[in-house]
Amino acid sequence: MKRDTDAAVETIKKNIHVDPKIGIILGSGLGKLVEEFENPVSIGFADIPNFPVPAVEGHKGEVVAGSLAGVPVLVFSGRAHYYEGYTMEEVCFPVRVMSELGVETVIITNAAGAVNETYSPGDIVIIADHINLMGDNPLRGTTYFIDMTEAYSHELREVAHDVADDLGLKLNEGVYLVLSGPSFESPAEIRMMRIMGADLVGMSTIPEVIMANKLGMKVLGLSMVTNMAAGITGRPLTHREVIQATRKAADKFKRLVRGVVERLGRA
């Protein structure tokens, strides 16, 4: 049975005081961005009807509405994951809610492992394309044949590059590959991904991107590199390492996203 978005939309509308056209989904450990908000209003996911609540460290699980750089913005701090046992429909429920609240542009972020050995922890990478190896699709059960040629808006990627240049930040562009998780990838799987053309690997984002494209939203995807993927350094991988890396690079990330939002608000 499809989750009803009406009650969730109505609950959020009753609590927020802005009319946002820009939405942001914050991945593991990236929730510090909300500290930049002016006059923020927060609502816990658990207080919103039908909203999936994450149980993973680094995902606070709240909706924050307010102004960022003078621009009305709606942020979902944290996300529910497919590997937590949620369905694709549930994982994408927040994107549907954003769309019904009037969001037209969404910045979708995540923490990712570097398959590309030229990357380093702390790098921010613009997602230019993706490879979906989750074995599922949020549009399964429908007949929506969505074109994914430009799943990640070229226009928004150019904006991000321009802002990064102004801030003196280095930005790469890469291909993000997703698996269902929650186990980290094996060294052999990482070698396979490199052959396939992947630069990054993670366990989220692509279902949300597919749904956003289906709903006609423009997407900017940003990955924070938190670790080198399995087999590159010889060290075991942990989620704690992911959280620590995002916290160290939080200031750079906040400056970039704030700059992008400010630029979009002037457009």
Image (cartoon, rainbow, N blue to C red):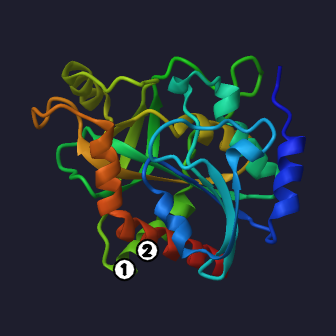
Answer with the quarter of the image where residue 227 lies.
top left
Indicate left or right for 223 with 83 as reference: left
Residue at left 74%, top 65%?
21
Please name the residue shown 80% across and 65% down the image: 16
> Is 64 or 267 nearer to us in this picture?
64
Which residue is labeled 1 in the image?
167
Q: Is residue 198 above or below residue 68?
A: above
In the displayed structure, 151 sits above or below 67; it is above
| Residue 44 coordinates in the image, percent (x, y) | 68, 51
Residue 162 visible in the shown view = no
Look at the image and tell me in which quarter the C terminus lies: bottom right
Q: Which kind of residue does numbered mark 1 sit on?
A: Leu
Mark 1 is surrounded, within 10 Å at the Cα level, by few (under 14), some (14 to 19) or many (20 or more) other residues, namely few
Specify the label residue 56 is tagged with. none
Q: Position of residue 164 (x, y in %)?
A: 39, 73
Front-most of residues 158 and 125? 125
Sooner in the amino-acid sequence: mark 1 or mark 2: 1
For mark 2, what is the residue? 255
